Amino acid sequence: MLGIGRYRTLFTNRAVTLLVTALVFSRVGDQFVNIGLTWAALELTRSAVATGLIVMTYALALIAAGFFAGSLLDRYPRKPLMLLDNALRVLCIGGIAAAGLTHHLSVWLLVVLGCVAAIASTITVVGTRAYLPTLVPEELIVTVFAVDSSLYQVAAIAGPALAGIVTAAFGASWAMAVGAACFALFLAVAAFIPAGALDEGIPPEDKPVSMDEELRGARYIFDHPVLRAVTVLTAVANFFFTICIFGLTFLSKDTFGAGATGQGIMLTCMAVGSLVASIALGAVRWPYPRGISFIGSSIILGFLTALIALAPTLTVACAALFVVGAVDAAFFIWMSELRQRTPPPELLARVISASMILNTVAVPFANAATGAAVNAIGVRPMFAAAGGLLAAYSALFLRNKPLREAA
């Protein structure tokens, strides 16, 4: 089965169609929150370093909750958990918006409500990654990961540009209000997912609550040579790549003078490249081993992000980011495929949640490092250094035989 037929077959499943539609709203909401949170922090603190620390705190809350998200999803029905997650985000992000619009928003309120929203969001993030693939037959696994990647890109196309425009025109509080409305739309659509659909492939089980049970997913990753290598490469690669992505805020503001609008446009161009690549990869059978393809895509990402340091205009930066997005989509799909096919069913949620945490454990520190680096060496040198280090680090894994030869 090749080409558009793969997607046609995938979307004959009502549960898949409804979950994918709901996720578009949730992920657009995430984009509004990401930009709204950054600019709300800048408006409150007027400091790149303080803004980086606030964004770092938000990301740390998301990471810290990840282990428990996998545990909850292993034990309880998934649809009610996802509905609760998005309901909490409506309240928290809506609360930030209301406080901002009434001029009562403080740094502490922004951090506390943002962290609660981040903690709640792990349910939908982990649940989608773990159980969306269980709704489809084996031959459509790659296609469903392409759809998952495409969802992020559709959201990233619609979200950042609109969020940037809304933020520039009306302020960060209105961007947060739109984000809360998007989470409410997730609730409206996901409520119609057939009962039990997300529990059919791997039903929840009554497992004992203990630290040993919670850490089984992480132990499995470190005991498995391919997953261990994937995780170590991705964790450090995400650190350098996040510096470049968060750095777009300051590249737009300080270098191109385009503010939130320029940041949104650049992120949208990257998302368009990712969407094009995701759709293409989901429609074909990639003929090369996933391991070497995964390593190669990370090396290329490093070179491309380093080249952004040389972009003379916003237009050139957007063109480069389109290519960055295409390569990043391939990186994500091959990483997800290697991760999904490996663990036993009873450990799937905990392995994926542990993997997502370990993959992103350095991201909060990258946010803080970005603000410090901008102050210390400037935006363009920061891009050159982060991209070059990403390429060099990824190239080390060409010597890792288990990962290099992973099919």
Image: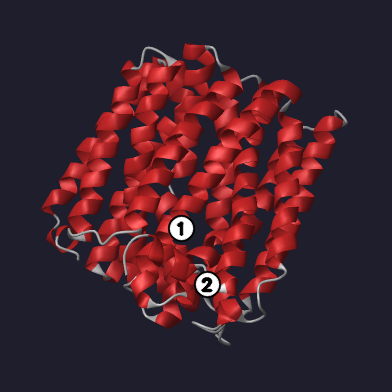
Question: What's under tag 2, amino acid-wise?
Answer: Thr
* Residue 393 in the image: above or below residue 321: below
Element carrying mark 1: helix
Q: Quadrant of the C terminus?
A: bottom left
Q: Nearer the viewer, residue 379 or 165?
A: 165
* Residue 288 in the image: above or below residue 195: above
Closer to the eye: label 1 or 2: 2
Tell me which residue sits at (47%, 12%) in the image: 255
Taking the image as shown, residue 19 lies to the left or right of residue 188, namely: left
Outermost residue, right side: 102
Q: Residues within 10 Å of mark 2 (few under 14, many from 20)?
A: few
Q: Name the residue under label 1.
A: 147
Q: Position of residue 181 (x, y in %)?
A: 75, 47
Q: Residue 12 carries which label?
A: 2
Compare marks 1 and 2 and give the one earlier in the sequence.
Answer: 2
Q: Position of residue 372 (x, y in %)?
A: 47, 24
